[in-house]
Amino acid sequence: MDIRKVVDGQRERRAYRVRKRVRGTPERPRLCVYRSLQNFACQVIDDVTGKTICSVSSSEKALRGQIGYGGNCDAAAKLGKILAERATAKGVKAVAFDRGAYKYHGRVAAFADAAREAGLDF
């Protein structure tokens, strides 16, 4: 059996387990995170209308100079602060945190802590 198929199946089950409980509303949209080996991205989503309110990624050209390498905790913390500023500018104060298939550890935790410090409530 191919180990990649096993790992992908486990990741899909973890993501489903989290997302069946977390829903975004217009008052409290969903903050969804994605991480890869070299980048980190997140977006604030209103699931009722299916619209993305705001997003940030370490692969954005405007942010590459500020962030540098996007696959570490420092980059995730900077992105958390930037996302919180963008979300509050759009009128979003509280979000439901969707960690997806990732543990609340390392880059995901650094991102969440920085977003909380910058003013997002979750």
Image: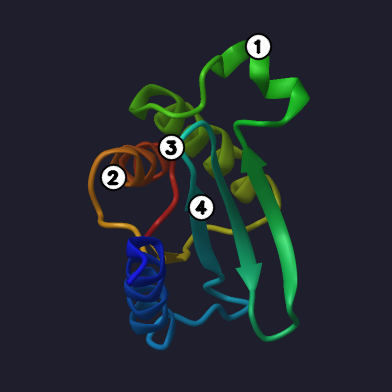
Q: What residue does disc 3 label?
A: 118
Q: What residue does disc 4 label?
A: 34
Identify the residue shown where x is 60% and y is 60%: 44
Q: What residue does disc 2 label?
A: 109
Q: From the top left corner, tell me how far across and down residue 46 is, in percent.
A: 65, 74
Determine the CA span between mark 4 and mark 3.
20 Å
Q: Contact (CB < 8 A) between labels 1 and 4?
A: no
- Left or right: 35 as drawn, with respect to 107: right
> Mark 4 or 3, which is nearer the eye?
4
Determine the CA span between mark 4 and mark 2.
12 Å
Rendered view: 60 above or below 15: above
Q: From the top left corner, tell me how far across and down residue 121 is, in percent.
A: 39, 57
Rendered view: 47 above or below 35: below
Q: What residue does disc 1 label?
A: 65
Identify the residue shown where x is 32% and y is 72%: 1
Dot 4 or dot 3, earlier in sequence: 4
- The amino acid type found where label 1 is placed reads Gly
Determine the CA span between mark 1 and mark 3.
21 Å
**Where is residue 73, by image quadrant?**
top left
Identify the residue shown where x is 51% and y is 61%: 31
Secondary structure of the residue carrying numbered label 4: strand
> Mark 3 or 2, which is nearer the eye?
2
- The amino acid type found where label 3 is placed reads Ala
Determine the CA span between mark 1 and mark 4.
20 Å
- Residue 100, which numbered label? none
Dot 4 or dot 2, earlier in sequence: 4
Rendered view: 101 above or below 111: below
Dot 2 or dot 1, earlier in sequence: 1
